[in-house]
Image: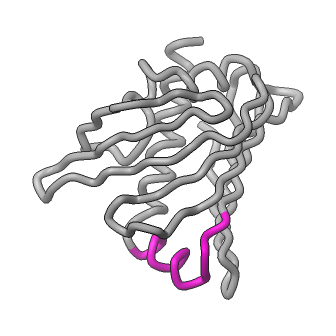
């Protein structure tokens, strides 16, 4: 299995995530944007997920809720740019920190053996980025990327 690389440079509001998948850009894009598959890969293992809306198109929006024994964690955002099999630009907001909106850019780059998913997130401040890291963002990202690789292999 390919490794997920997470880079959160000190004193910047950025997080970079990179992962290679054994799939075509079209296959990965389909799995990451299908509202019926989102709950199968997005978020940490061990949480239940309800997808209220996942409308991947320019101007579309999303909202989903993760649940565990400690409570509910709702997230929402708007898709600003969607280029089939190539690019998604969206906002991301955890409703537990209202007004702390992150801008995310995901690119689907073909490689010789598959596709590289590269995500670049820009937080409103270094402090905001650091808070998300402290709340367990790394675990959620790594679990999501592993679950996504498993789903892509299954959906193939």
Q: What is the magenta segment's predominant secondary structure?
A: helix
Q: Is residue 98 left or right of residue 86?
A: left
Is residue 129 in the magenta section? yes
Question: In the rendered view, would you say 31 is above or below 115?
Answer: above
Q: Tell me residue 70's x, y (percent).
A: 13, 59
Which image quadrant: the N terminus?
A: top right
At x 60%, y 83%, the residue is: 126
Q: How many numbered circles does the render carry? A: 0
Question: In the rendered view, would you say 92 is above or below 124?
Answer: above
Judge by depth and name the residue closer to the eye, 60 or 108.
60
Question: In the rendered view, would you say 101 is above or below 81?
Answer: below
Q: Tell me residue 140's x, y (percent).
A: 43, 53
At x 42%, y 18%, the residue is: 36
Q: Tell me residue 152's x, y (percent).
A: 56, 22
At x 62%, y 40%, the residue is: 79
Farthest residue in the front direction?
Answer: 59
Which image quadrant: the C terminus?
A: top right
At x 69%, y 61%, the residue is: 16
Question: What colour scheme has been applied to the protein in the rendered image?
Answer: one colour
Q: Range of the magenta residues?
A: 122-134
């Amino acid at each position: 299995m390919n490794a997920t690389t997470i880079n959160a440079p000190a004193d910047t509001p950025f997080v970079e995530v990179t992962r290679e998948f054994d799939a075509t850009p079209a296959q990965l894009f389909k799995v990451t944007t299908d509202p019926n598959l989102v709950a199968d890969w997005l978020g940490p293992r061990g949480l239940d997920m309800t997808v209220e809306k996942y409308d991947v198109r320019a101007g579309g929006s999303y909202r989903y809720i993760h649940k565990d024994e400690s409570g509910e964690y709702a997230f929402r955002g708007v898709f600003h740019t969607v280029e089939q099999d190539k690019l998604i630009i969206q906002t991301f907001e955890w409703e537990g920190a209202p007004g702390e909106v992150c801008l995310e850019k995901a690119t689907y780059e073909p490689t010789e053996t598959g596709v590289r998913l590269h995500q670049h997130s820009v937080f409103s401040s270094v402090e905001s980025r650091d808070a998300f890291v402290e709340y367990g963002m790394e675990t959620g990202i790594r679990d999501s990327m592993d679950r996504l690789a498993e789903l892509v292999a299954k959906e193939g």
